[in-house]
Image (spheres, rainbow, N blue to C red):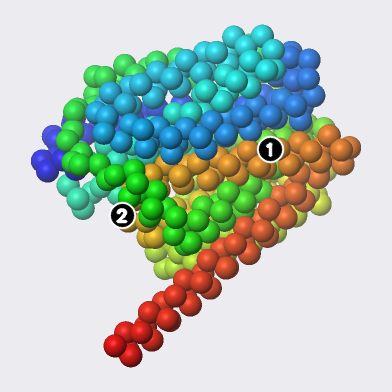
Amino acid sequence: MSDAPVPRRVYKFAVFALAIGAFAIGVTEFATMGLLPHIARELGITVPQAGHAVSFYAIGVVIGAPLITTIAAHMDRKILLLCLMGLFALGNFASMLAPDATLFNIARFVSGLPHGAYLGIGAIVASSLVPANRRGRAMSRVMLGLTIANIFGVPFAAALGNMLGWRSAYALVAALGILTVIMVAIAVPRVKLGQAPSARGELKALARPQIILTLLAGSVGFGGMFAVYTYVTPTMTDVAGVPETAIPWVLAVYGLGMTAGSLIAGPLVDKSIERSGIGGMILSALVLATFGAFTHIAAIAIIALFLIGIAGSMITTALQMRLLRESTDAPSLSAAMNHAAFNLANALGAWLGGIVITAGLGYRAPAWVGVGLCLAGLIVILIAIALRRGGSAEHANRTVVD
């Protein structure tokens, strides 16, 4: 990390530039869900087939996050951020121009490759610009771009897609990517981040059972939310009877739930990471079950979406802190793998949700798939907690004997 913090105005401008990139990533990750019916109609495919684009983006994140972080471990951070955002803009520009479903899926995969590496490295660069006691705040301000994206960016992209066609939403994201490249080039100073840990050392650290189980809990348990959210537009229009023009407001309600969840999760996680993770999984399962049972009542379905956002933020915050606690000697790769785990949940939820819809079970069915995924994630996190407590007790016994 840089030993000398930069002037406050330089830091604020740099964090703002990095947050624009996080905002763009948040928009492109979730905007597809609000545009699925439009994409399906124009490309001549079914809604579940259009949902494959969500999975392809997520798979790009899963592959790109650890691969890019490892390969580019010794690359200048500013140059790397510029390259990542350039690739991101290119992928979204290709998404806008894709003439068929196959090329669209490939473009979404390319768009996802820089996701995890940009967020992880951007947060680390932001933290390097301030004293040690303000680094957590700096990282959170970069990630604020994701939160704002879910409240304003995703609904706006959905509304834009309704008015001008779905391709306009990806044109907007590509423009945001180009804007980020320009802003990062101007605003982010070169910083000396010190010697990067070896890839072998980081990979060895990530092989610990506690880290593997935490990543697995996120990959499975968070998939419940994506099983529902991927198909939220056709579900709300066809089952709940919400007008298509009101979908941007429905998406904004979910974004507000995520924001409220972030505010709630912080104090809860400070008290207990484990109880927060368990509580988030249980709440998510209960709310998804409510959504599945009462989707036909628009008011209940919208309230349930707000609560799904809260539960999702509780899960992600708790598992992020758990991963940070267990992998202090593998910071870069663990941060990237954290984003990869939640995007694996994205791919898994979208895929399983599409399967039950294609099987003719209707748009309520993904909610019940989500309940199953949440319960599976709950089991994994309970196993991780039990093993950790067992290991702590064994270590304490050995200490007494010694």
Residue 289 picture quarter: bottom right
Task: Report x, y in % for residue 74.
Answer: 26, 33
Q: Residues within 10 Å of mark 2 (few under 14, many from 20)?
A: some
Instruction: Please state if 102 lies on the left or on the right of 127 as rendered.
Output: right
Q: Quadrant of residue 70?
A: top left
List the residue tagged with mark 1: 350
Outermost residue on the front side: it is 200
Residue 354 seen anywhere in this rendered image of the structure:
yes
Whether residue 268 is visible here, answered yes or no, is no
- Give whichever of 315, 336 is nearer the camera: 336
Nearer the camera: disc 2 or disc 1: 2
**In this image, 374 relative to 129: left or right?**
right
Q: Residue at x 51, y 35 (%)?
A: 63
Q: Measured along the vertical axis of the image, is residue 299 above or below residue 321?
A: above
Residue at 17% x, 35% y: name it. 192
Real-space Cα distance between discs 2 and 1? Answer: 33 Å
Q: Nearer the viewer, residue 272 or 387?
A: 387
Name the residue carrying label 2.
329
